[in-house]
Amino acid sequence: MTTDMPARMLRLLSLLQTRREWSGHELAERLGVTGRTVRRDIDRLRALGYPVEATTGHAGGYRLASGTAMPPLLLDDDEAVAVAVALRTAAGGLGGIEETALRALVKLEQVLPARLRGQVGALQEATSTIAWESRGPRVDAATLTVLAAACRDHEIVTFDYTTRDGTPARRRVEPHSLVASGGLWYLLAYDTDRDDWRIYRLDRLTQPSPTGRRVPPRALPDPGPDPAAYVAAKIATAPVRYRAVAIVHASADSIRARTWALADRIRPLDENTCTVDCSADTLPRIAQTLAALDADYTLDADPAVLTHLRTTARRTLHAAGSGSRD
């Protein structure tokens, strides 16, 4: 018999989540209590937000239904490991839900027992995913969760970082937000050594280490307070190695729908024409952005960009010409 009321309610909730419907008699037997106690515990679960419905029939019973809010779930060990691995995979690059998956992953890993964290890590290391439509470098999910937790807790972190010109550096920052854009993840943080706000690409960041020191949150300067808008504005005006601006014969809305170029870099000229700033630090990324336009365009670009595009075009034409013919 379960005499500890909180433990009994957790056991009751677990039973309700494992089967579609239970009779009151079955629940009483499983818990070693009376039917009256079961009814009282059901009322307590309802008061906590769990939508437990009473069912009609020969003996009547109970079932856990969908509700207007999401109450806490109970997961066994295998379920917790499976959900954590799935969330890590989604957070690392599954288009459209990365940030949502990351928030859920941080909550789950915060309460995950140490014995299960090891299982999650081992399974993640042994699992590979084919990213058929990856639009950017994949980011280690462990790095994401460490930084997301630091953003939430306003905890200073240190990490190794490779700058745009390939120089290794060590950074110490107050994390503010993580932003996903254009197939890339960015960390928006206040750099304590430089006494200024900085944006870091997570694919260039390794070995993030929480310091245990928490600080009051800082307010973003203009154009704050939206982190995504702040990052977009800074990236759009940041210096890049190669310049390339296209005048595209398509509407700005249609280009936004089929390219990962930043929205701030797509500007309408009229209903059927827009400019797209495809400038980047690497030549292949510029070529990928231009290919995704899927429309006619004219290009104003650095000589290195034009040379790279001509070389790529010659290789493509040669490959197409050497293909088998009917």
Image: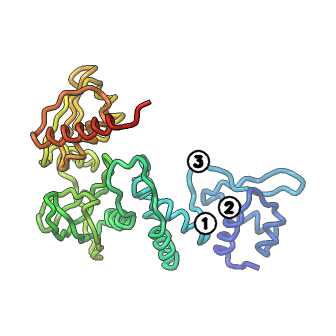
Q: Label 2 belongs to which residue?
A: 17
Decide: is 106 above or below 98: below
Look at label 1 and name its amino acid: Leu
SS at badge 3: loop
Q: Alpha-carbon neighbours of circle 2 within 10 Å: few (<14), some, or many (≥20)?
A: some
Q: Residue at x 26, y 36 (%)?
A: 290
Furthest residue toward left? 303
Q: Label 1 belongs to which residue?
A: 74
Q: CA distance from mark 2 to mark 1?
A: 8 Å
Look at label 2 and name its amino acid: Gln
Q: Residue at x 18, y 58 (%)?
A: 198
Q: Residue at x 42, y 58 (%)?
A: 103
Can you tell which quarter of the image residue 140 is in?
bottom left
Viewer-nearest residue: 245 or 315: 315
Viewer-nearest residue: 276 or 156: 276
Measured as percent of width and height from the top left, residue 235 is found at 20, 47
Whichever of labels 2 and 1 marks the residue nearer the N terminus, that label is: 2
SS at badge 2: helix
